[in-house]
Image: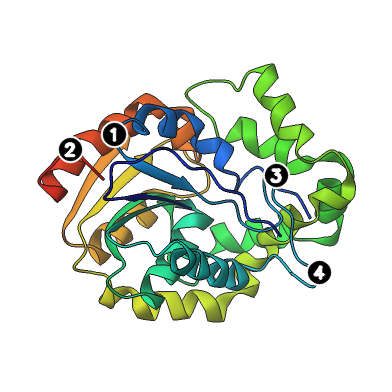
Amino acid sequence: MSSWRTTRSVHRSPTTSRERASPQNWSFLWREVITALRADFRCIALDYPGFGLSTAAPGYCYLPEEHARVVTAFLDELHLTGVTLVGQDWGGMIGLAAAQRRPGVVQRLVLANTWAWPVNGIPHFEAFSRIIGSTPARFLIERFNLLVNTFIPTGHRRRRPTAAEMEHYRRALETPERRGASAVLPRRVLGSRAFFAEVEAGLPALAQLPALIVWGDADIAFRPRERARLEATFPEHTTVIVEGAGTYVESDAPAEFVAALRDWAPLRTGSAQF
């Protein structure tokens, strides 16, 4: 989850000071977008505890419910207001939960290849969670870095991540212990149903917010039906389809992502600032 606040300021990319782990929820994915925007907008990219280069406090379980509490506390700690919240994949669900818990703090939404409701009983998501969240898959994730070696390449469809990029992702998860957090979320796709239902129930309170939906249409995780449901949830939306882009559209097609934000932001704020 990342947020663009309505203030002109320098770029900050904090990592929470809390077992290091997954690249899928690491602000490294946003590096090119932030680099392109930081001269004009204050950009704050948050790593969840245990993800990217952050560490987690003892007893932290890496559940999306916990991440939502951390993001909410992060908003409070920085006294953020007028936030344009940007969320992709898990960041959409978790960011929306934080927005619901702090009414009025978030004024605009940018959602990319994400969802915000329970998916139990939907074969597409059931298969993913049961297979990738299984004990054998957890072994492969922790011992052979399955998620980095598989998800990063398949999440980029417009371009192939360079050897240097892949090395950077792998070095953040050099040991099986540091891969533990990334093994948790797949099974929580089904296991956190109550949390997802809570987020879904809170969506009407956010429905009036202007929303930009940036969607990689070659994503194998989130399909047109998920995008259509987001569009129905947020009537004041603008949708930008990034043709051929995968799950990590912000990294797969950063120029298009930046262009979509720049084109949309002045219409929402009356200026060229987030």
Q: Quadrant of the C terminus?
A: top left
Q: Earlier in the sequence, mark 3 or mark 1?
A: 1
- Which residue is painted at 40% across and 77% down in the image? 101
Residue 58, disc: 4
Q: Mark 2: which amino acid? A: Ala
Q: Contact (CB < 8 A) between labels 3 and 1?
A: no
Which structural element holds mark 3? Answer: loop
Q: Earlier in the sequence, mark 1 or mark 4?
A: 1
- Which residue is painted at 36% across and 43% down in the image? 42
Q: CA distance from mark 2 to mark 4?
A: 42 Å
Q: Which residue is mark 1?
A: 40
Q: Which residue is mark 3?
A: 53
155 with respect to 182 (left or right): left
- Which residue is painted at 59% across and 66% down in the image? 67
Please identify, in this view, whether the residue under mark 3 or under mark 1 is nearer the observer. 1
Q: Mark 3: which amino acid? A: Leu
Residue 272, disc: 2
Residue 78: quarter of image = bottom left
Q: Contact (CB < 8 A) between labels 2 and 1?
A: yes
Residue 271, disc: none
Which structural element holds mark 2? Answer: loop
Place of residue 15 in the rendered image (x, y in percent of width and height, measured from the top left): 61, 49
